[in-house]
Image (cartoon, rainbow, N blue to C red):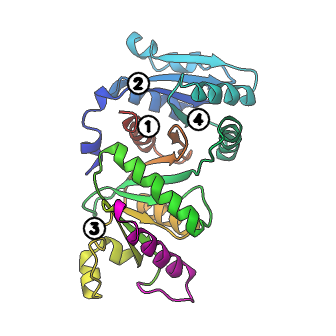
Amino acid sequence: MSFHTLFQNSDKLNGNIAIVNAVNESTIQVIQTVLSKTNATFTLYNHQDVSELIRSYELPMAHLKRIHIHTFNSEEEAITQCLDDLNHQRVDILMKGLISTSQILSAVLKHLKQQHAKPFFLNHVACCEIPTYHKLLLISDVALNIAPSLEEHHKMIDNIAHFTTQLGYDALKIALLSSVEKETDKLPSSVQAAQLKCLYANQPERNNIEVDGPLALDNAISKQSATLKGIDSTVAGDADVLIVPHLDVGNVLYKSLTYFGHASVASLIIGAPYPIVLTSRADSVANKTHSVLLALKTLS
């Protein structure tokens, strides 16, 4: 699967995307692009009047009618109203504009705790289209959970399994990364990977999910490397998902792929009742657009 395949019917994608602080040019450019590619609408929760900035893009009237702007006295008021609208399903997707990640995530987690008895586990997933890899590659967690425990990694995989089902996957190959292929007490990541592998091996009802590890990166993505090392695994060399042991590994891998590997990326926070588009200010307009399209795809 590629982004072209995943988004080939983007004109049929529908949903209401809520953006907090859509007050900068790159966010408006994303809005402009998504409006031209989809049937989605946008609801903006701003603490600044952005009407003039939007008008400067000379959008067609049909597109302007799909942008709804609410202006508040403060960021806090904007976030509160946005989260209330998400809770009541008046909007479908949350997207971060020009606001700090910590501020909006803190508000989301607090709101979920107040509104729902059931606890939610959230994780970040990056969907990468890499020129040298034969299909889309998902990586978690590169921006949210710092050092996930065994239980948290289990929840992370469950979130990803549900998420990929929404995207149309009917089977999933998940590689648990470490720097070695055999469990050793000297490397806690290898021990936890082996434990996770056993956990899923003992759940026959999950026969559409293959989990293997520990695997070094080269063996997870290169069948030739895995063969040379004598690794007998259907996941090795054909992984759909890489689960990294901790955030530092994920963050470096993600940035290496985007800066050195020229990967196109779409990123989301999953596990909440709604998808969260939480891109970085340094992300390109194209990658931010891909992230919005990916979120819309989960609604279709």
Rounded to the nearest whole Å, what is the CA distance between mark 1 and mark 4? 12 Å
Residue position marked by numbered label 3 in the rendering: 238
- First in sequence, mark 2 or 1: give its number: 2
Separation of residues labelled 2 and 1 (CA atoms)? 10 Å
* Residue 78 or residue 182, whichever sits in front: 182
| Mark 4 lies on residue | 97
* Sequence-earlier tag: 3 or 2: 2
Which segment is the magenta one? Answer: 181-206
* Dot placed on the residue nearer the N-terminal end, 2 or 4: 2
Answer whether labels 2 and 1 touch (C-beta < 8 Å): yes
Badge 1 crowding class, 10 Å Cα cut-off, few under 14, some 14 to 19, many 20 or more, is many
Q: Quadrant of the C terminus?
A: top left
Instruction: Find out whether the residues at labels 1 and 3 contact each other: C-beta distance under 8 Å.
Output: no
The residue that mark 2 highlights is: 40
Which percent across, then down, holds residue 209? Answer: 34, 62
- For label 1, the SS is helix
Can you say whether 145 is above or below 268 in the image?
below
Q: Nearer the viewer, mark 1 or mark 3?
A: 3
Q: Does 299 appear above or below 252? A: above
- Which residue matches tag 1? 292
Membership of 184 in magenta stretch: yes
